[in-house]
């Protein structure tokens, strides 16, 4: 039997005829092992999800032990790992008295957060305000929430009750501000204005990525506190999509905690790093205030695999590993180093227009055709051929980089060794020189 899936699997986010990827047969730490015996350094944690690296022994053991005890029981019954994980999440987030609704991944966490917000706010058809150039998943409502030009044409966002506002994209500020924090505040003002235009009584929630956005926006620090103030003043729920940004990616357990725990959202959605991606799992964490509004009424939502015991056991082990191995702090330290290294590349390569992020191990490098005009190298969301070639060559040299449009996204597992990180950046330096004929700047 062939292990080549090229003819049989319908691959996501791909042109099927062009899909050519090596087969992964194992991994350890930040490295993947391929079927041809080669090792590849994973500089993106696969889909920015394998925060604990590959085959973390504590995760593997927790899944094995739970599989032996009890693989599955539905939500109509209790399950020990589910109860433990919910308690751990409520404790870590400070959402005392809140509740956790478990899902299978990020898109359905966002879908269910919207349903819960509409039910708890008593605005069953209430509008959800989201952002252009955001990413919230690829199911229909999640696609409508995502201000992602790749998928917007496939859904009627307005018809699904979603209204988009411009993002706090400081490098190309849609509010014409040259100052990042000012751009962030204007981004929050745009949300406030949109709520007022639609009417507070008709807006169920604002749903946003708090810091690092999957489509490469990193919100200035002014953004989240201003957004929290604007939504609290209007008594509109604020939902943080922490699917990618949580579990150390932004140097905190949850990215909103960058603001010294003063700006908690009313709900947050989780997935990816929640189990270190070892088993699919998502979650909606709700505040006490929202949970108490639902306490005595029927919740009309559910999934067969809500809070699957195997996934929850992996979640418990993942949260223990983040804490025991100080990985959140490690990400903060290495993130600052990675940002400094990427900024040094920017000094050497004219093609790098902007470098952002670095609060944890998430750094975005944006390539431009012209630094002065900031003209993009290719129109979003297209990836310039030279960047595709760079990624291809990096892979041949044993390092896997993720790109999105003109962006290189550096988001390695939090366990990556420092010399591996240096190795990846040295390779990137060399390949940028080769592919973009860089003149020192
Ligand atoms: N939200 C964010 C911020 C994400 O990055 C993603 C996935 O990339 C999702 C939601 C969707 O998660 P999933 O792919 O698990 O449905």
Image (cartoon, grey):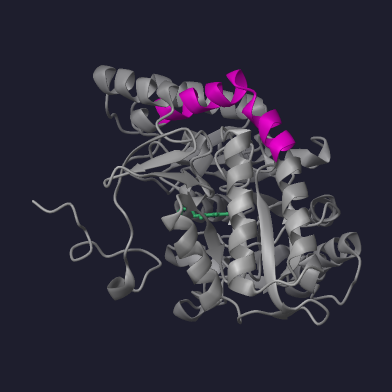
Left or right: where 182 falls relative to 295:
right
Which of the two residues, 112 or 172, is positioned nearer the viewer here? 172
Name the residue rendered at 55%, 55% in the picture.
Answer: 114
How far across and down, in percent of the image, does residue 5 sit? Answer: 21, 58
Which of the two residues, 4 or 380, is positioned nearer the viewer here? 4
How far across and down, in percent of the image, does residue 295 sit? Answer: 55, 35
Residue 201 lies within the magenta run: no
Tell me: residue 15, above or below residue 142. below
Name the residue rendered at 40%, 36% in the picture.
Answer: 278
How far across and down, in percent of the image, does residue 284 sit? Answer: 54, 42
Tell me: residue 127, above or below residue 111. below
Which of the two residues, 296 or 287, is positioned nearer the viewer here? 287
How far across and down, in percent of the image, does residue 429 sit? Answer: 65, 58
Tell me: residue 121, above or below residue 435. above
Q: Quadrant of residue 82?
A: top left
Which of the two residues, 345 or 215, is positioned nearer the viewer here? 345
Left or right: where 262 falls relative to 73:
right
- Check the image and name the residue furthest to the left: 1
In the image, the segment drawn in magenta is 312-334
Quadrant including the C terminus? bottom right
Residue 329 lies within the magenta run: yes
Q: Quadrant of residue 2?
A: bottom left
SS assignment for the magenta stretch, majority: helix
Does residue 94 appear in this view?
no
């Amino acid at each position: 039997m062939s292990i080549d899936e090229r003819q049989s699997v319908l691959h996501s986010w791909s042109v099927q005829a062009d899909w050519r990827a090596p087969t992964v047969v194992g991994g350890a730490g930040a490295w993947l092992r391929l079927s041809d015996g080669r090792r590849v350094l994973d500089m993106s944690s696969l889909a920015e999800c394998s925060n604990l690296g590959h085959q973390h022994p504590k995760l593997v053991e927790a899944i094995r032990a739970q599989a032996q005890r009890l693989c599955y029981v539905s939500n109509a019954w209790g399950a020990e790992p589910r109860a433990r994980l919910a308690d751990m999440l409520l404790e870590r987030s400070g959402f005392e008295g809140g509740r956790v609704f478990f899902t299978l991944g990020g898109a359905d966490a966002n879908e269910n957060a919207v349903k819960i917000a509409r039910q708890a706010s008593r605005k069953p058809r209430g509008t959800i305000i989201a952002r252009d150039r955001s990413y919230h998943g690829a199911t229909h409502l999640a696609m409508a929430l995502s201000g992602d030009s790749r998928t917007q044409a496939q859904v009627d966002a307005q018809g699904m009750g979603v209204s988009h506002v411009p993002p706090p994209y400081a490098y190309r500020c849609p509010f014409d501000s040259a100052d990042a924090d000012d751009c962030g505040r204007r981004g929050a003002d745009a949300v406030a204005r949109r709520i007022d235009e639609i009417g507070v009584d008709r807006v169920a929630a604002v749903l946003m990525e708090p810091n690092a956005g999957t489509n490469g926006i990193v919100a200035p620090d002014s953004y989240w506190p201003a957004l929290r103030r604007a939504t609290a003043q209007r008594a509109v729920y604020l939902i943080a999509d922490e699917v990618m940004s949580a579990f150390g990616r932004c140097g905190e357990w949850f990215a909103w905690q960058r603001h010294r725990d003063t700006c908690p959202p009313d709900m947050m959605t989780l997935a990816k790093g929640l189990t270190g991606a070892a088993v699919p799992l998502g979650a909606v964490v709700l505040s006490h205030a929202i949970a108490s509004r639902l306490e005595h009424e029927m919740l009309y939502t559910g999934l067969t695999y809500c809070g699957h015991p195997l996934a929850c056991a992996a979640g418990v082990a993942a949260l223990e590993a983040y804490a025991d191995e100080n990985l959140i702090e490690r990400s903060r330290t290495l993130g600052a180093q990675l940002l400094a290294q990427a900024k040094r590349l920017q000094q050497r390569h004219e093609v790098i227009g902007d470098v952002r992020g670095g609060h944890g191990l998430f750094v975005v490098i944006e390539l431009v055709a012209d630094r002065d005009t900031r003209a993009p190298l290719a129109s979003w969301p297209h990836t310039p051929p030279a960047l595709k070639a760079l990624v291809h060559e990096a892979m041949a040299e044993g390092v896997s980089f993720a790109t999105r449009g003109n962006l290189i996204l550096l988001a390695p597992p939090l366990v990556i060794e420092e010399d591996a990180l240096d190795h990846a950046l040295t390779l990137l330096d060399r390949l940028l020189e080769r592919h973009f004929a860089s003149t020192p700047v």
